[in-house]
Amino acid sequence: MRAHVAIGLVSAAVLGLSASAQSGRHLNPMVDLLAAKKAVFGLGMPSAPRGGGAGNRAGGNSTALATTPTPTPTPTTPAAPPKTPLDLAKDAIAHPEADYFFSGGMERSVDNALPGFTAMMDAIVEAGGIAAKPYRHLLVPVNMKTPNISRPDQPADPAVYVSNISKQLNAGVTTLSFVEVDTAEELRQGIAAMRFASKGGTRPNDIGNAPKYWGLSEADYRKKADVWPLNAAGELVAWAIVETKEGLANVREIAQVKGLGVLVPGAGTLGGVFSTTNAEGRRVRDDVAWEAAIQQVLAACKEFKVPCGYPVSENDIETRMQQGFTVAILQSFNDPSFRAVAKGRALSGRDK
């Protein structure tokens, strides 16, 4: 083994190969971790707070407003200016403990969210979001939800979901999370939309600015922009989120779809699925049924040896990891999420 390594290093030095070629590692760090069956940890994509709040808006009865004395304003510290995309990109890069950054911003509409996301991706490039050492890799690989491919009341339109997926990939996304996956066929259609026709898929030939976001030539991007593990050299990963009773009924078939990288129980949505309205008009979750649904997805992961993800928190990450969940999803970018990732990495031995 040592002789092979030495020969490889000498050859790389002579040929001037890149660090990534020497190591065989991927631009998308998630791929190498999944291939090595290691725990994976993600943070929510940093974003600027939405506008709104109380502000100085008037309301209520106009007479009352006219007769009530106006209080003397109290001096306050000026609010910090909102963060720019470049500020947010630098924030993300400052957290190398995250293996990916998760966003649900396009779950309902790709077109509405695309301009803001593109500005963020441009900022990541400007901030130096591609590391050269110890091997070439993306510092802010993005895991993005994609709109539901099909609903019972709205049959899938291939032209729509293929277009949505293409736009997301063209914007540099490395991982797509398919939401509300109900059937294996639905997932197969989604994975096909991630692959170019030359690879047997349905993705259009246009690639937008994706090569820029990955730091590649157009030719190299086309080689690498394929789904792992269908293509061992691929950089794209497909996730399936099961969050309906139909999906649970079909979860074993879903888990066996070729090209699936991670299977996830949509715990939040499933909480609503297993809730009813009581006599007082309050929604009450059936915790036993809810947990059974989560464990049903985990059982399928274990049976078919698919990495299983879970939207953990600082409070339950240890429990879920002990149960067998190996992909941690933190949907926020804040101190509790940072602590959760640190805790998970320590528990998994990633930092040894």
Image (cartoon, grey):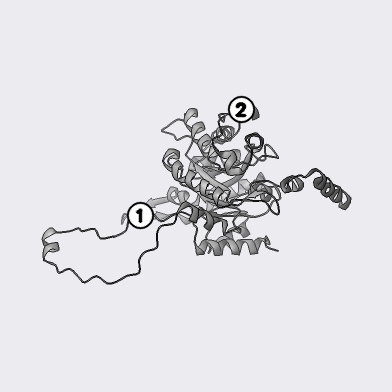
Residue 331 visible in the shown view: no
* Residue at mark 1: 51
Q: Quadrant of residue 209?
A: top right
Disc 2 is placed on an element classified as helix
Q: Quadrant of residue 192?
A: top right
Q: In which quadrant is the C terminus drawn?
A: bottom right
Amino acid at circle 1: Gly
Q: Which mark is residue 197?
A: 2
At x 14% / y 62%, what residue is drawn?
65
Where in the figure is residue 225, as x and y percent of width and height?
A: 63, 37
Q: Is residue 300 above or below residue 231?
A: below
| Residue 217 appears left or right of 12 | left
The earlier-in-sequence mark between 2 and 1 is 1
At x 89% / y 50%, what residue is drawn?
3
| Residue 229 appears left or right of 247 | right
Where in the figure is residue 223, as x and y percent of width and height?
A: 67, 35
Q: Is residue 33 above or below residue 66?
A: above
Total marks placed: 2
